[in-house]
Image (cartoon, helix red, strand yellow):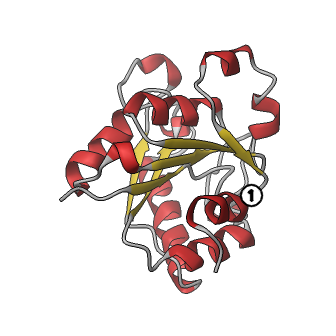
Amino acid sequence: MPIPALFLDRDGVIIENRPNYVRSWADVAIFPQAIAALAKIQHLPIKIIMVTNQSAVGRGIVSLETVQMVNDRLLAEIERGNGRVDAVYLCPHAPDDQCRCRKPMPGLLQQAAREHDIDLSQSVMIGDALTDLAAGQAAGVRQVILLRTGRGEAQMAMPEVVGLRPFAMHDTLADALSAVFGSD
C-alpha cells in the first residue's frame, strides 16, 4: 500500500545555499534546527526523500562523486542527530540540458514514488525555490512549502510566483515540519 513522503530540497532547506555551489564538504553549513526537526519526525510512518538539483555537476564545476560524498556525509550527520533521510535523488544536469529530472520538472519525485511506493497525493514538498514548489505541484503532491532559510524570500518577488497554486511559507524547516506534523 502506498505511503506518503516528505520531499526535501537540500540547499537552503537542510544546509545553507552557496552562491558558488557546494563544491566540497568544507562548503557545507548545516542548519542545526533542520537536524533537530528531522529527529522529531524520524518515527513517523512516511518516507523522507531529499530531491536536489546539482547543476554544478553538469556545468563541470564539481564531480558527481563529490556531490554523492557530500550527500552521504550529510545523511550521516542527520543520522548522528537521530534523524533520517530514506533516499536521495539528484539531478546532475545543467539548466540547458532539457532533462525531465531537473526541478521544476517532477521527474525526481515521480522516480522516488515509483521506487518507494509513495502516494504523491498525500505527500509534502519543502524547498526554498519556486522550482521546488513547481516540481511538487507538477507531481501532484498534497502540499508545497517555501522556506525563508534559503532563497525563499527573494523568490517571492519573482513573476513566476503568480503561476503557482497557493502554498505555505515558513521561516525554517523546523517551523514547516511543526505546522505539517504537529509539535512534540
Viewer-side residue, 178 vs 47: 178
Look at the image and tell me whether residue 53 can be seen.
no
Circle 1 residue:
172
Placement of 166 over or under 64, stated as above or below = above
Residue 143: percent from left, percent from top: 52, 43
Viewer-side residue, 173 vs 143: 143
Instruction: Locate residue 174: give its quadrant.
Output: bottom right
Instruction: Locate residue 144: give its quadrant.
Output: top right
Look at the image and tell me whether residue 76 can be seen.
yes
Left or right: residue 80 versus residue 113 is right
Tell me what residue is drawn at x 66 percent, y 60 percent.
Answer: 179
Viewer-side residue, 169 vs 131: 169
Placement of 100 over or under 132, stated as above or below = above
Residue 121: percent from left, percent from top: 36, 42
Placement of 71 over or under 129, stated as above or below = below
Left or right: residue 82 versus residue 65 is right
Residue 12: percent from left, percent from top: 69, 50
Residue 22: percent from left, percent from top: 64, 50
Q: Quadrant location of the C terminus?
A: bottom right
Could you tell me how many numbered marks the image carries?
1
Left or right: residue 176 versus residue 48 is right
Name the outermost residue toward the front. 182
Placement of 2 over or under 102, stated as above or below = below
Tell me what residue is drawn at x 49 percent, y 17 percent.
Answer: 96
- Name the element at disc 1: loop
Looking at numbered disc 1 in the image, what kind of residue is underneath it? Thr
Tell me what residue is drawn at x 66 percent, y 57 percent.
Answer: 176
Q: Quadrant location of the N terminus?
A: bottom left
The crowding category of the residue bearing disc 1, from other C-alpha atoms within 10 Å (few below 14, some 14 to 19, many at least 20), is many
